[in-house]
Amino acid sequence: MPDFLPENIAAILPELWVSFGQTALMLAIGLSAAIIFGGPLGVLLFLLSPGQSLDRPAAYRVLNWLVNTVRSFPFIILLVALVPFTRVIAGTSIGPLAAAVPLSFAAIPYFARLVEQCMREVPRGVIEAAHAMGASELQIVWRVLVREARAGLVGALTVLAISFLSYSAVAGVVGGGGIGDLAIRYGYYRFQTDVMLLTVAVLIALVQLIQFIGHTAARRLDKR
Amino acid sequence: MSHHHNIQHLPLIRLDALSKSFTLPNGRRFDALREVSLQVREGDIFGLIGKSGAGKSTLLRLINLLERPDAGRVFVAGRELTALSKRELRAARQQIGMIFQQFNLLQNATVAENVAFPLRLHGGRTSAEIAARVAECLALVGLSDKAQSYPAQLSGGQKQRVAIARALAPKPAVLLCDEPTSALDAETTRELLATLADINARLGVTIVIVTHELPVVQQLCRQVAVIEDGRIAEQFAVAEAATKGRTALARELAALQRLALLQAEQAHDKEALHA
């Protein structure tokens, strides 16, 4: 151990790296689930909504209600309530993999709503022009909606990543680990202020980095 | 080609007793069109004029079934569009290009990608064929040098030219124009109308244009229908506006023609004086 570091910091340094990996793992799984399941759900919400090409008011109301309901749960309640489900999916109810299950569960409707909002920014006329040229619904989704909303979608993903960095701290409740959990266990429970400051500094740096990457990518993608 | 000559005596577009109503936000029913029938000959430039809310845009959008009629039938190039399945209709729409007041280009796609868009939808074309057709269409509207630009870098007139190139890419028989000059200034409007007239003359594409601007009709159209209150009030050849027209709009059109004639004579006299 380098001895110029305060004792507490030196002691948790190896664990900080592990925590960093755990946070990255939880975020990667949560965001992937958001994109794979939340993305199509968001597109569906948009297409089913009144005045859009599929326009199914009943189906829209059901999906809308579901998304709102899952989003109403405080994350910590969702985490505990989903324990039986988590056991089935992850095979265990503790650890970062287990924590990734409720994290994904919360991320899917969150991202779906953000995607729906992004799609609403695409001018109606552009969708109509594609219909007039004989595009199918699927072609409109990929070649019009995703393309025209891509900067907004990257922005939405950035917002999601940053929210879930902070959600992942709660994952400590099920032994999920991660940087936020480290801050709670050492900094808060053991009154090690220096550890607390270090973890918060790491989180600040991470948030700045994610925002910077997201912002730069969105700007590059936006030709409007 | 011979096939086209054979059907020349038949209308390219036939609208048969079309009705369309909408439910307004206040719950009341609004009859946008009441049993409208209309025929457009192949190769014609046909204007639909009327006040806003008269139903002219709805009528245009019924031709490619962007709006579904409540009753009536739509025929384009010998096929009944109202009888087609969704899939067949998508294929048939390659026959019908459309341009809009707000251009409706993809902002995150280059000019070339925009023009290629309809060609990539239906398959059966190699990328070399698509690239060649895109170059051809951009040359047609005089925008070959803008192929790699994004729409945001273009002027309004240039955007509408890209939209025309995109509409023409699948070699349609019909070009539907929904207020295509309303977002453009007078000079750009004149240029755009010249482009449309040129396309009609060179490619024989039948043009149906909705506008509330009478000068557009006067400069471009050969036939015109006046839409009032969801019905066709009258229909006549633009050249016969003064003798055949009965509605207020027709009389305005005739006055516009007299003015244009007067101006042309004056310009001619001036030239003679200088000579």
Image: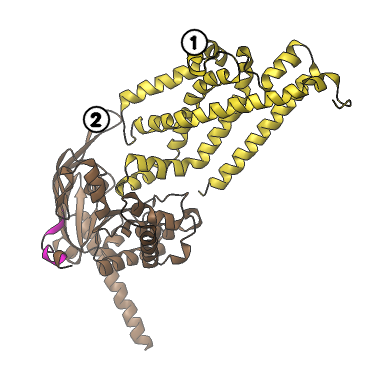
Chain colours: A yellow, B brown
Which residue is label 1 attached to?
Answer: A84
Q: Is residue B188 left or right of residue B63?
A: right
Residue B230 visible? The answer is yes
Q: Are discs 2 and 1 both within one chain?
A: no
Give the residue at the far front of this rendering.
A91
Residue B210 visible in this rendered orientation of the protein: no
Residue at x 69% of width, y 24% of height: A18
- Pointer 1: residues within 10 angstroms few (<14), some, or many (20+)? few
**Viewer-nearest of labels 2 and 1?**
1
Q: Could you say which quadrant of the image residue B124 lies in?
A: bottom left
Three-letter amino acid code at the position of disc 1: Pro
> Residue shown at 26%/50% (left/top)?
B93
Position in image of residue A30 (x %, y %): 54, 26
In terms of depth relative to the viewer, which is nearer, A27 or A222? Answer: A27
Q: Position of residue A212 (x, y in %)?
A: 65, 38
Q: Position of residue A176 (x, y in %)?
A: 62, 17
Image check: B233 left or right of B145?
left
Q: Which residue is mark 2?
A: B28
B165 displayed left or right of B242: right
Question: Exactly how many numbered labels are in the figure?
Answer: 2
Residue at position x 47%, y 33% from top?
Answer: A115
Q: Chain of mark 2?
A: B
**Inter-mark Cα distance, 2 to 1:** 52 Å
